[in-house]
Image (cartoon, helix red, strand yellow):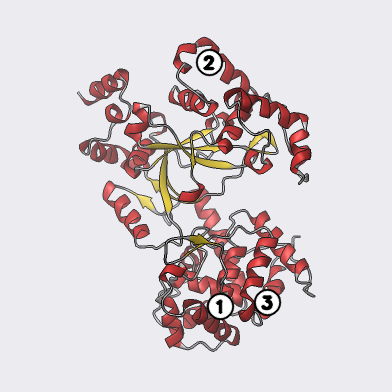
């Protein structure tokens, strides 16, 4: 049986180590870089970005947990354990540790907005948290920081001392509500009372409660029961999204949406629906161009060809998204073949600086994977870090050939990590459908070989659309001018909409 909570002792050692590092914040930043954590840049009062040079201990923990993939978080924790020479046993799991929001990792704002010793106050509070003696005045001062909220602070307390403090993330709150345990608080004493009540009533340590909560939420997610947030009307959707508008971000983000007519559908491109599709991806790509060459005459790149193929419903490695939530809501409700299934609406957050454009070299790399046959794989290069060795490999050379056929001046160097990435791409607005639908795309690379799509690591939320509300929502959308004829401007779709309406 797998041993759980091996991470607790490592977290305790990290906390003790951090206690002595307030004057060595540069060291904390270097440690994070060394273990493979990607750090955000700070912003000065002139509006210039620069390398982060200050950090607090809570944010250090948040950075360790910014990745959704458990294997990545565990790898980071193991590396820290080895690098700092901890004496406790190496962790083998991270069960029960809440993730931090990858776009809201910091507990302090940009330097441009720091006005009240925010980082110093976070260090002071950290020391009080370790000693389990928290002054409410300081607690309130930290809560007033623009990048801090009650849930986020409680999770930070939990990272610092998982044997004493309860994380009040959404999953844990949902779980303790089942046991009639209060979960709202205004003062530090009220928060501590919630922790004590949960420990007493459930007879579990905070890290065990957190674990139970995450397991419980996974069961909810898989069964889509009533505890899941549901959208029953346009008004409900706008109320839900309005809550996000109240949040502040450390970095500018772009918001996108996607609607699924069935809540059971996965966030995967259509080419990955069956093994026969992905096995013949290169043939599908070439065959449709061979049969309809004039349709692709104006396409300058493989990505633009994939967009055109997606337009005609041919399976590709693209996933359609939109910046308009009402458009996504339409697609979550429209498919008549799924009228007896609950739908799902996704909301994605993408850092503006991570957005790619249609002519990006990285996008060219991933797009041209679609032109390579099924045996294409970089599994044998998984542990190879030397860029020259990677680019001398025959598999990469063939991919380079495909890329340079559309970009003759493309540098003969591929960054291996691009092949295994998912990029958010802004297309050319040269297609009436894309313009009407306010569309963009996620384009998926591969995870080792072509049979597996790259891991999707963008932060997202999702909401259930009840099957019983779909027709009502479609009528509401139609009243706002969102229907098949406006989103699909081709005449056959306009005719279909009018036929159904009258």
Location of the N terminus by quadrant is bottom right
For discs 3 and 2, the disc positioned in front in the rendered view: 2
Classify residue 397 by image quadrant. top right
**Callout 3: helix, strand or loop?**
helix
* Residue under the point 60% across and 69% down: 61
**Callout 1: helix, strand or loop?**
loop
Q: Which badge, 3 or 2, is on the more N-terminal residue?
A: 3
Task: Establish if 190 lies above or below 241.
Answer: below
Q: Residue 21: in sight, yes or no?
A: yes
Residue that badge 2 annotates: 288
Q: Point out which mark residue 165 bears.
A: 1
* Residue under the point 57% across and 66% down: 62
> In the image, residue 30 lies at what x, y percent?
66, 66
Residue that badge 3 annotates: 12
**Callout 2: helix, strand or loop?**
helix
Q: Which badge, 3 or 1, is on the more N-terminal residue?
A: 3
Q: Give the distance between the C-alpha atoms of the residues marked 3 and 2, in whole angstroms.
A: 59 Å
Q: Which of 411 and 170 is in front in this view?
A: 411
């Amino acid at each position: 049986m797998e041993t759980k909570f091996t991470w607790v002792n490592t977290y305790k050692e990290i906390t003790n180590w951090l206690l002595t590092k307030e004057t060595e914040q540069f060291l904390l930043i270097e440690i994070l870089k060394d273990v493979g954590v990607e750090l955000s840049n700070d912003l000065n009062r002139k509006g210039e970005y620069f390398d982060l040079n200050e950090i607090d201990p809570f944010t250090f923990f948040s950075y360790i947990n910014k990745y959704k993939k458990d294997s990545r978080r565990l790898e980071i924790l193991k590396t820290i354990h080895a690098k700092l020479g901890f004496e406790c046993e190496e962790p083998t799991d991270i069960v029960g540790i809440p993730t931090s929001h990858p776009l809201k990792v910091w507990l302090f704002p940009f330097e441009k907005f720091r006005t009240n010793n925010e980082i110093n106050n976070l260090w002071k509070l950290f020391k009080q948290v370790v000693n389990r003696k928290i002054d409410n005045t300081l607690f309130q001062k930290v809560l007033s920081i623009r990048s801090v909220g009650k849930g986020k602070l409680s999770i930070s307390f939990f990272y610092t001392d998982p044997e004493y403090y309860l994380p009040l993330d959404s999953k844990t709150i949902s779980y303790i509500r089942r046991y009639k345990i209060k979960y709202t608080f205004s003062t530090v004493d009220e928060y501590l009372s919630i922790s004590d009540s949960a420990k007493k009533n459930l007879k579990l340590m905070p890290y065990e409660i957190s674990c139970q909560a995450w397991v419980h939420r996974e069961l909810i997610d898989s069964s889509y029961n009533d505890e899941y947030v549901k959208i029953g009307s346009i008004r409900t959707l706008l109320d839900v999204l309005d809550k996000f508008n109240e949040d502040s971000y450390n970095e500018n983000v772009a918001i996108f949406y996607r609607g699924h007519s069935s809540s059971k559908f996965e966030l995967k491109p259509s080419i990955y629906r069956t093994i026969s599709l992905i096995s013949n991806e290169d043939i599908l790509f070439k065959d449709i161009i061979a049969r309809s060459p004039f349709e692709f005459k104006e396409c300058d790149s493989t990505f633009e060809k994939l967009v055109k193929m997606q337009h005609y419903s041919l399976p590709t490695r693209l996933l359609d998204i939109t910046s308009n939530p009402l458009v996504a809501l339409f697609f979550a409700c429209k498919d008549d073949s799924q009228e007896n299934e609950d739908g799902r609406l996704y909301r994605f957050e993408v850092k503006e600086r991570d957005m790619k454009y249609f002519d990006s070299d990285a996008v060219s790399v991933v797009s041209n994977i679609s032109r390579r046959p099924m045996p294409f794989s970089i599994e044998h290069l998984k542990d190879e870090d030397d860029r020259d060795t990677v680019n001398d490999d025959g598999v990469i050379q063939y991919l380079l050939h495909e890329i340079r056929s559309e970009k003759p001046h493309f540098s003969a160097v591929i960054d291996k990590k691009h092949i295994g990435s998912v990029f958010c791409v802004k297309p050319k607005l040269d297609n009436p459908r894309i313009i009407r639908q306010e569309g963009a795309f996620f384009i998926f690379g591969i995870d080792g070989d072509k049979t597996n799509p790259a891991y999707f690591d963008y932060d997202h939320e999702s909401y259930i659309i009840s099957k019983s509300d779909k027709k009502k929502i479609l009528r509401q959308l139609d009243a706002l001018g969102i229907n098949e004829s406006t989103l699909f401007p081709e005449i056959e779709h306009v005719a279909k909409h009018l036929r159904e309406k009258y």
